[in-house]
Structure formats: C-alpha cells, structure tokens
C-alpha cells in the first residue's frame, strides 16, 4: 500500500508528537523520582512506631510549654482530639 505525501506528513507529525510526549514523560519521571512519593494534600499517612514515639514525645514537651493543641494538630496533621488524647 503506497502512502501519499499528505499521509506521510501526517504520520511524521504523529511520530514527532509521540517523541515529544515520551521526552516529557521521562522528564516528569526524573523530577518525581527526585521528589519522592506523590502525596495528595490532606491525605492521611501511616506513621511507624518510631515516628509515633518521637511525635508523642515532642507533643508532650510542647504541651508542657503551653503550645496550643490546635497549633500542634496543624503541625503534625492530626486532630486536636488526638493531641488531647496524648498523655504521660
């Protein structure tokens, strides 16, 4: 099957676009690999036991200094009820 010049030009444009998409995808993948995992704003995260212990100790220390629970909740991404639940 012989292709016309117009068909060849269209195919060349498609090939060029696909190469551009591939280059862009590789560029984005490199950036994403450097940035780490993608996380939605407001999405929950699971803490390890070590992170939880560290956070708990920091919350207790800051609460003893009088830092408001609302500020701590915002800083750690948890509810104020969770901050109030943390006790000695």
Image (cartoon, rainbow, N blue to C red):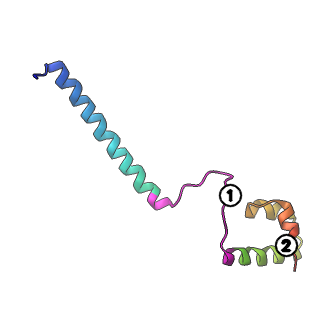
- Furthest residue in direction front, as rendered: 1
Residue nearer the viewer, 35 or 65: 35
The reply, left or right, for residue 55 in relation to residue 20 is right
> Measured from the top left, where is residue 54 in percent x and y?
72, 77
Vertical position of residue 62 compared to residue 29: above or below: below
Quadrant assignment, res 38: bottom right
- In the rendered structure, the answer to whether residue 32 lies left or right of residue 52 reads left
Which residue is located at x 69 percent, y 52 percent?
42
Count of marks placed on residues: 2
Mark 1 sits on what residue? 44
Pointer 2: what residue?
86
70 displayed left or right of 10: right
Q: Main secondary structure of the magenta part?
A: loop
Circle 2 — which element? loop
Q: Residue furthest bottom?
A: 88
Bounds of the magenta span?
Answer: 33-51
Residue pictured at 32% horizontal, 46% vertical: 23
Give coordinates of residue 18: x percent, y percent.
30, 37
In the picture, measured across the screen, residue 8 lies left or right of residue 20, that is left
């Amino acid at each position: 099957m012989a292709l016309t010049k117009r068909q060849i030009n269209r195919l060349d444009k498609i090939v060029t676009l696909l190469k551009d998409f591939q280059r862009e995808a590789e560029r984005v993948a490199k950036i994403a690999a450097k940035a780490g995992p993608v996380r939605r704003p407001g999405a929950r995260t699971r803490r390890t036991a070590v992170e939880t212990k560290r956070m708990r100790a920091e919350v207790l220390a800051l609460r003893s200094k009088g830092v408001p629970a609302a500020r701590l909740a915002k800083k750690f991404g948890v509810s104020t009820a969770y901050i109030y639940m943390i006790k000695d």
